[in-house]
Image (cartoon, grey):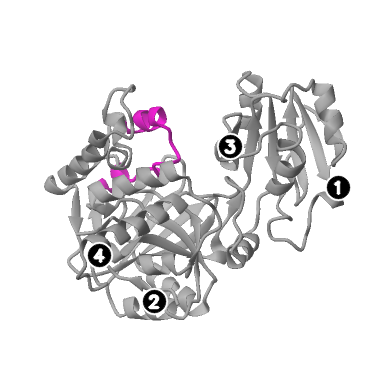
Amino acid sequence: MAKIKAFKGLRPVKEKVQLVASRPYDVLNTAEAKKEAEGNPYSFLHVVKPEINFPSDQNPYAPEIYKKGKENFDLFMENGVFFQDDKECLYIYRLTMNGKSQAGIVAAAAIDDYFNNVIKKHELTRPDKEEDRKKHVRVSEMNAEPVFFAYPAVKKLDEIVDQIVARKAEYDFVAEDGIRHELWVVNDDNVGKIIAEFDKLPATYVADGHHRTAAAALVGQDLRDENKKFTGKEAFNYFLAVHFPDNQLTIIDYNRVVKDLNGNTKEEFVDKLRKSFDLKLLGTAQAKPGKLHEFGMYLEGVWYALTAHTNTYDDSDPIGVLDVTILSNEILNPVLDIKDLRTDKRIDFVGGIRGLGELEKRVDSGEMKAAFALFPVSMNQLIDIADSGAIMPPKTTWFEPKLRSGLVVHSLK
């Protein structure tokens, strides 16, 4: 059963929260993060992407980078930008985007649940990214950013959360992208009620943040190994997570762009696709897929609508039914010779939040040769895959809205 714990959160003072709250470390590259934090000494990017405080040629994985992140957070504490709650709390974090809200329970999740597969995964992690986040957690001695979990919706939990969010929120602000962020502190008898309901859940699911989840669990294990007399109650046995009911979440498309056609001319490439797809030339009209097994392709200033032939997928197979699988099996691998999506430098991935115009931009600039728009997977598909123990291809899911970092921090000390 899923084990969560209340904790004494480290939080920004109310009058600074909007300045502190930042987008997650992995949504922005270093240059974008530096620009976003420019002129704002309170931005949490100084903690989660401390390389922005160094010259652009600095190695972002050097020891001094992680040390700087800890120093920046320690200064926040010393200068009264952050404080620690004096009671163990849970928190409710609600995000509202385009009139649609999702409310999650912020809690400390157990590393044992990660190792015992009570926390279920659907993606492989990359060792380099995992090691980066491990160093950040270990040096900073905290989980600076929460991971994004889902759980099968429970009526009782919905009722408790609804009761809490009827109160005035501790934080309530609209970020520059128009997304509203609200946070409630829970330190009454609802804490026990929420924990008891989670204790009935057979599993929770990593929606977004597999590397942060793995890193937090592995650091916790390392600290156990170094503290042979650990009791299991220490803070390092847990890590920061926001748990959302699955029926409130939105997965949007996660699209692909490729650098070349693997020696094929445009005509040869299009002709090879006819083996597996029905193609329709749309011209400049964007081809946004309307259902599973439909694809859009942008090539040399022209959009094509592609519909996969029925022999290219298996609706009874949780992985075989995915459009990312079809794309890899029928185009990327056999035609373009892109076999490993995690390591091949000839492919890149574009979150659907940027729109199909971003795909056109990447191709029209000459940076990329072709782009593929995909229909998003569903939460049911994600849960089916995680329950089956299977692994999705890399870069399959893109969740919006993104959690802001810096609203609550979980100390390992």
Work out whether mark 3 precedes mark 4 in sequence or the reverse, and give the earlier one. 4
Which residue matches tag 1?
309
* Viewer-nearest of discs 3 and 1: 1
Which is nearer the eye, 155 or 388? Answer: 388
Location of the N terminus (image quadrant): bottom left
Q: Nearer the viewer, mark 3 or mark 4?
A: 4
The disc placed on residue 194 is 2
- Magenta part of the chain: 15-37
Q: Is residue 170 visible?
A: no
Q: Residue at x 32, y 53 (%)?
A: 407
* CA separation in Å, label 3 and label 2: 37 Å
Q: Which residue is mark 3?
A: 350
The residue depicted at 45 percent of the width and 69 percent of the height is 116
Front one among 263 and 26: 263
> Is 380 situated left or right of 15 in this image?
right
Q: Nearer the viewer, residue 234 or 152?
A: 234
Q: Tell me the CA gap for discs 4 and 2.
A: 19 Å
